[in-house]
Amino acid sequence: MPAPRSGVTLDTLRMAFDNLRAHRLRSALTVFGVVIGVLVVVVVASILTGMRRNVIEAVEEYGTNSIFAFHLTTGPQLGPRDRAEFRRKPLRPEDGAAVRELAPAVGDVAHCAFLWLEDRTIVYGREKYGRAQLQAVSANWAEVTNLSLREGRFVAEADDEHRRPVLVIGHNVAQALFGALGRAAGREVRFAGRPFTVIGVLEKRKGGFMGENEDDNAVFMPYRTGRIVAPRASDWLMLVIRARSGQLAAALDQAEDVLRRRRGVRANQPSNFDLSTADRIIQQFDGITAAIGLIAIAISSVSLLVGGIGVMNIMLVSVTERTQEIGVRKALGARRGDIVRQFLFEAIALTLSGGVAGVLLAVLTSRLLLWLLPSLPSQIPPWAVVAGLAVSIGVGLAFGVWPARRAAALDPVEALRYE
């Protein structure tokens, strides 16, 4: 009575893994390309997945009903910026006021000027912090961008009107300057050769593009104070437009119309400014990750091709070495399908072991990157593991067909005579 198919399959698998164990070094060298290919795909996927999660958290923290207006293109992008963009005139606080007044779907508008100074160092006694992200903001900036304070208060209208030398600092700045002292509000620091008083400290923000949110390194001052510290601060001004609940699309259209009219853009001309929303920024990032993913796939494809050719070569050698074994199996009643299945399973077992090794190395690499570079997000998605293992099985199946068919085509009488 013939053996059940499941029993035949298990015996074939057992024989395949026994053959791999009998030639451990040769098998390991053969699947090296498969290991590298799977490793690259899974590691790149883990980094991009972690970045995407942090970008979504950071953008949503500002509010899903927010619109970001800037004279240059905002959001993540690949490649150099179009030089023509730098000829655009910057936005002004008056533009924000016009949007607030003339766009019914807009609830509020805040503005922020980025201060590009050579020396960004904040000094408190002997402590220094040189990574400050300096921004001069309107008094409603915290409310519009959903900033939370750990202590003290935010910039007020009076601070802006009287150009007071006051600062609101991010979590990292406070930790670096006052970590061992506790409360920071009320302390005097020096910046740009002037004394400033710290009036508030921000709560730690969620992740950003590379795992760290820039607001944790932020130093906010009143907008008009910033114009004193850096007279050209208004050349890098961004508006954050908060739409009324459920009216984001209308607010986007209305804000664009107002800004186009104020900037003298004709109907047949493209806008000379950029408007971004949370969805648009995430879409831009997805476009970048898709491009990086294609590059990673191209690199891994070369490794998988090399690994597949190596598997095919070693399986052809195995067929030659085991010609008499094949003859004996055929003489005992093994059919062509049994021989094909045996060698296909061996090829798949070979590449699958390489896929498993690649996944394990990817997990270790991701953990190592997270330990060495805590700001670099890394989160291995389940689909990347499944895809890596599926591809490794596919490589074994594709490159094992020819050796398997060649083994099955051997004449049993000639095979038994083979020396």
Image: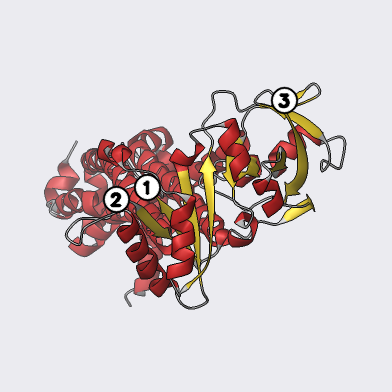
Q: Pinpoint residue 385: horizontal percent, then vertical percent.
A: 45, 55
Query: Which quadrant is home to the C terminus?
Result: top left
Q: Are marks 2 and 3 in contact (CB under 8 Å)?
A: no
Q: Tell me where residue 295 sits by quadrant.
A: top left
Residue bearing the label numbered 2 = 272
Mark number, residue 128: 3
Q: CA distance from mark 2 to mark 3?
A: 40 Å
Q: Earlier in the sequence, mark 3 or mark 1?
A: 1
Q: Reading the chain from its start, which is encountered first: label 2 or label 1? A: 1
Dot 2 amino acid type: Asn
Q: Position of residue 338 (x, y in %)?
A: 25, 62
Mark nearer the viewer, 2 or 3: 2
Task: Specify the amino acid type for callout 3.
Answer: Lys
Does dot 3 land on a helix, a strand or a loop?
strand
In the structure shown, which secondary structural element does the residue marked by tag 1 occupy?
Answer: loop
Instruction: Report how far apart the C-alphas of labels 2 and 1 lie in the structure.
Output: 7 Å
